[in-house]
Image: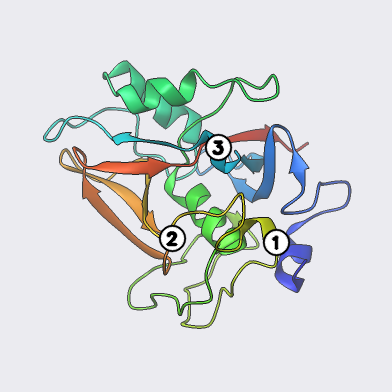
Amino acid sequence: MSAVEKAAQPANIPAIGEAYGGGFVTGIARDQDTGARHLWITAGAEHELQGRWGEYGVKIEGVDSFTNSRANTEAMAASGSELAKQVLALEIDGFTDWAIPARDVQELQYRHFKPTTEENWAGRRDGDNPHSEPVGLLYSEEDPKQTAHEAFQAGGPEAFRDTWYWSSSQRSAYHAFGMYFGDGSQGYGDKSGELRVRPVRSELIQ
């Protein structure tokens, strides 16, 4: 585990990368509205899904959070998103509270599970994450480095693919936020586009 990962893990919290809660420990983020601390868990690669975020040109209420993945996903499903419905229907090791990661939760996935040794995209606000513990800073070309967790390294059984993944955070009626796991670029795409999703769930930290 890296020094940054150690700093992110208070006592008695499972280590980042550890198999736990139906997936793998991904990090800690605070809810942007309540400040509640959540331990985030990423599902294994076999549970990835792919599909459209939603209907292009339709603004959905209740999907603007950068931290509340579950509320975003439930609102997406209520609006008719088949991708969100598939994620909500998942049951992994008895856990049924899976969601499409909100933008700042998705950033933790890249920060701790970056698959490649390629330079990071470092031209905008990529990596800025005020809700994570520790707070996420702007990426440099060298930081974050390739994950130390071998299963998540390129070619490993749990590795993210060199492509774009949806978050559940809406940008506008036409676009939703996503992330490119080849270089950590955080951007947005046309809601009607077919992108991948790696589900997450969380547990409240007392």
Q: Is residue 127 above or below residue 58?
A: below
Q: Which mark is residue 66?
A: none
Q: Which residue is mark 2?
A: 181
Structural crowding at the residue carrying mark 1, measured as other residues with C-alpha within 10 Å and reported as few (<14), some (14–19) or many (≥20): some
Q: Residue at x 37, y 56 (%)?
A: 163
Q: Is residue 194 above or below residue 79?
A: below
Q: Residue at x 50, y 60 (%)?
A: 129
Q: CA distance from mark 3 to mark 2?
A: 17 Å
Q: Which residue is mark 3?
A: 46
Q: Looking at the picture, which amino acid does disc 3 mark?
A: Glu
The answer to whether marks 1 and 2 mark residues whose Cβ atoms lie closer than 8 Å is no
For the C terminus, give its image quadrant. Answer: top right
Of 142 and 36, nearer the camera is 142
The answer to whether marks 3 and 2 mark residues whose Cβ atoms lie closer than 8 Å is no
Structural crowding at the residue carrying mark 2, measured as other residues with C-alpha within 10 Å and reported as few (<14), some (14–19) or many (≥20): many
Q: Which residue is mark 1?
A: 149
Q: Nearer the viewer, mark 3 or mark 1?
A: 3
